[in-house]
Image (cartoon, helix red, strand yellow):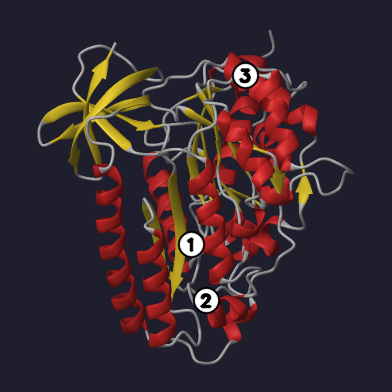
Amino acid sequence: MSQASVTRKKSTFAIETHGCKLNQADSLRLAREFVAAGYVRVSADGPADVYVLNSCTVTHVADRKARQALRAARRRNPDALVVATGCYPQRAPDDLKALDEVDLVLGNPDKESLVRQVTDLRGGRLEGLEAETFMAVDWRTTRTRAMVKIQEGCDQVCAFCIVPRVRGRERSVPFDDIVSDIRRCVGEGYREVVLTGTQLGTYGFEWPEISLTDLVKAVLRHTDVQRLRVSSLQPQEVGGELLKLWGDERLCPHFHIPLQSGSNAVLKRMRRRYTSELYREAVERVRTQVEDVSITTDVIVGFPGETQDDFRKTVDLCEAVGFSDMHVFPYSPRPGTSAAVYGEQVAPAVKTERVRTLMALASDQSRQFRSRFLGTDRPVLWERTVDMSGEEMWSGLTDNYIRAYAPYSEDIANSVTAARLLSVRGDGMECRILR
């Protein structure tokens, strides 16, 4: 056996992922490729021969977190090969190349050759990757939900969004590749798969008579996945034919439908393709057809030109809808987007106060949503143990996206059990496992 082969088999790698579920899907694929090349996966917070940060750049805060993570990785791993990849290097590669802590900077298209480039830099040799590699997964240290990319890129070019620049034009993953990927996830032991992408609702636009609805039908028909979740849909993409599929209990009753603003004037300036009225109609369709459904959303406050009246319309719409959770962000100018050069930029103090108002509403609505399920039984996918006021509790997610906590002495990581929801606690609900 050659020295390169010995070195390759003993080499360890760690991947830290920031940002969206699409990045999580990319990281899962990278992990498989590293394993196929003979590397051993280790935790991102420990020592590793190769450390990869799969970064986000949606806000300036995301950029700062990426730089902090890379510097921390170098402190932990002074002799490691430190790699920065993802959306931040795609947007501003020179910023990261200027960091002494980083050895290799690769944008999103370069992820396909990342493992090969890492191996070359370390003096090894890559004979080829096994496409059907199955990873041994440590469920206590790894995500129990597998993210599967079904499409990438965005043609909508919203005024605030950097994604079209860093992810490119829309393109769908071939039907058969997705089904094969999900079968591989099931073979590795994943109980839940999340279909992810930038614009899921436009899946299959390149091919006649293929849509997201057709894809979901095929996944349910041709795979044994226990739970299937659709990560995010635009309100104009939530149609009746798609919603009918939720009659299959394997589809999780949870929809993430980004709102961004409740003001039609702001939505128009953002170049969103819906109105507040269309948004409310989409929510009503979902609630009419999907029982016990959880609806979560994203909201941007302080978009250029947002008046107090615009913000009040956002608050009013959120109050009327009653989300189970909201992700609230202050607007962050991104170089290369049209909104970055808009006039009427909102003062930071105003944005901070508006975020505080919506976060308080989000907390109240989340508690109200969870309270509806007191005393009911829900299936929970258990993830890991956490410390809650000195007590070790198992933490997991119900099918309708409620964080569940339960005391239990056995190892139940990556198992799905029924659980009775007993009380609202912290960010979730305390429950009793039913076995």
Instruction: Identify which residue is drawn at 49% across, 30% down.
Output: 145
What is the C-alpha distance between the residues marked 2 and 3? Answer: 42 Å
Under tag 2, what secondary structure?
loop
Q: Amino acid at mark 2?
A: Pro
Under tag 3, what secondary structure?
loop
Frontmost residue, 254 versus 34:
254
* Residue marked by disc 3: 38
Q: Which of the two discs, 1 and 3, labels the residue nearer the N terminus?
A: 3
Q: Quadrant of the C terminus?
A: top left
Frontmost residue, 383 versus 248:
248
* Residue marked by disc 2: 333
- Crowding at dot 3, Cα within 10 Å, few <14 / some 14-19 / many 20+, comes out as some
The answer to whether 175 is drawn above or below residue 331 in the figure is: above
Q: Disc 1, disc 3: CB below 8 Å?
A: no
Left or right of 418 on screen, residue 40 = right
Instruction: Identify which residue is drawn at 79% across, 27% down.
Output: 176
What is the C-alpha distance between the residues marked 1 and 3? Answer: 31 Å
Q: Which mark is residue 341?
A: none
Q: Which mark is residue 63?
A: 1
Q: Quadrant of the N terminus?
A: top right
Q: Quadrant of residue 46?
A: top left
